[in-house]
Amino acid sequence: MKFFLLSDNVDTQVGMRLVGIDSVVVHEKKEFLTALEKALNDESIAVILVTTKLVELAPNIISELKLTLQRKLIVEIPDRHGNAKIGEAIDRYVSEAIGIKL
């Protein structure tokens, strides 16, 4: 099982390649969803890393996948352009999962 990165910039892609993680750079929602579907269908991929900017293109789809996938883990990662609001994203995810506003 391996990691795979869906990124919106080359800098993050290069950094992940240095540690052996394959990736693809996409910018549009349609490209992102196509690449995500391909990664989800690849049995060798266990963890899909997605930059915050891409998650913001399709937040409902990502939240639904996080809650329903049994064999893949989708992890949102900030990139160098990120605004470091990952804590808010985690709060939102937990709130959606358990139905309680934190």
Image (tube, helix red, strand yellow):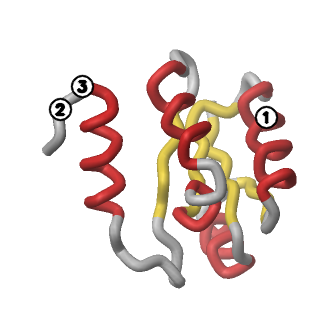
The one nearer the camera, 5 or 82, is 82
Looking at the rendered image, the quarter that the N terminus falls into is: top right
Percent position of residue 41, x then y: 79, 25
Whichever of labels 1 and 2 marks the residue nearer the N terminus, that label is 1
Would you name the residue on which mark 3 appears? 98
Amino acid carrying label 1: it is: Glu
Alpha-carbon span between mark 1 and mark 2: 30 Å
Would you name the residue on which mark 1 appears? 37
Q: From the viewer's perspective, is 58 left or right of 73?
A: right
Would you name the residue on which mark 2 appears? 100
Alpha-carbon span between mark 3 and mark 1: 26 Å
**Which mark is nearer the camera, 1 or 2?**
2
- Residue contact between numbered discs 3 and 1, judged by CB atoms under 8 Å: no
Q: Secondary structure at mark 2?
A: loop
The one nearer the camera, 99 or 7, is 99
Amino acid carrying label 3: it is: Ile
Q: From the viewer's perspective, is 57 left or right of 96?
A: right
